[in-house]
Amino acid sequence: MEIKSAEFVISNTDVRKCPEGTRPEYAFIGRSNVGKSSLINMLTAKRGLAMTSQKPGKTVLINHFLINDDWFLVDLPGYGYAQRGKEGRENIRRIIEGYILGREQLTCLFVLLDCRHEPQKIDLEFMEWLGENGIPFAIIFTKIDKISKGRLAANVEVYQKRLLETWEELPPILYSSSEKKEGRDEILGYIEEINQSLGD
């Protein structure tokens, strides 16, 4: 898939104010500092489309970007940022759940996981919740340039084993490095495949 245009449309905290229409939406979510904004900028080849920050927990809105006038890429707030405080975390949870459960146009949710870390309880619980609610999702392991291929394979295997303790089959798994621009074709190809199947 070639990205010919990527434009910011709207930011809000209320799913009812999201863009109207039936265009498919592909949302990206993950723990704070997982590299979500960098990945979005890499996928769209637009530096600065999504705001990147060294400070985790920056995205607190549902951000819609229209791609090729055909589908929306949605940047969701990161979850689990401890320094937000209980009220702040609760507010983010409401925004995330409101969008994921209430947005019919959501076609696939990409859950971003930092490939350097062992399975985190918060990520496993979040994916469990997605499964319970029948939300279609895929996993993207980010920052694959930061560890060796052997270590990456070992870490992913640990994740798969953990998931298979509760899942009958694994969700699709993709890999990315925003710095090295790796995984872009695979992720966009996956989105294109789904878009084509929707048109059939």
Image (cartoon, rainbow, N blue to C red):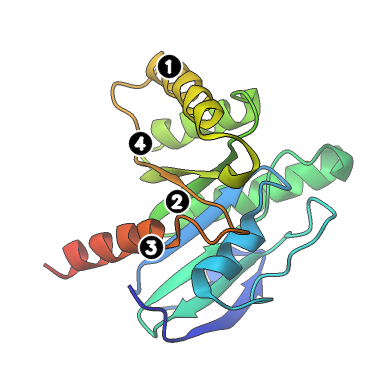
Q: Is residue 67 visible?
A: yes
Give the left or right position of residue 77, taking residue 87 as reference.
left
Task: Name which of mark 3 and mark 2 comes first in the sequence.
Answer: 2
Residue at (49, 33) in percent of width and height: 127
Whether pointer 2 and pointer 1 mark residues with C-beta atoms closer than 8 Å, the reply is no
Task: Name which of mark 2 and mark 1 comes first in the sequence.
Answer: 2
Residue at (49, 51) in percent of width and height: 100
Point out which mark residue 161 bears: 1
Residue at the spot of label 3: 185
Q: Is residue 104 visible?
A: no
Of residues 167 and 106, which is closer to you in this image? 167
Disc 2 residue type? Leu
Point out which mark residue 171 bears: 4
- Closer to viewer: mark 2 or mark 1: 1
Secondary structure under the numbered disc 4 in the rendered image: loop
3D distance between C-alphas at marks 2 and 1: 21 Å
Point out which mark residue 109 bears: 2
Disc 4 residue type? Pro
Task: Locate residue 57, reporting x and y percent.
Answer: 78, 52
Secondary structure under the numbered disc 2 in the rendered image: strand
Of residues 46 and 29, which is closer to you in this image? 46
The vertical placement of 49 against 79, above or below, is: below
User: Quadrant of residue 54 in the image?
Assistant: bottom right
The vertical placement of 91 against 124, above or below, is: below
Task: Name which of mark 4 and mark 1 comes first in the sequence.
Answer: 1
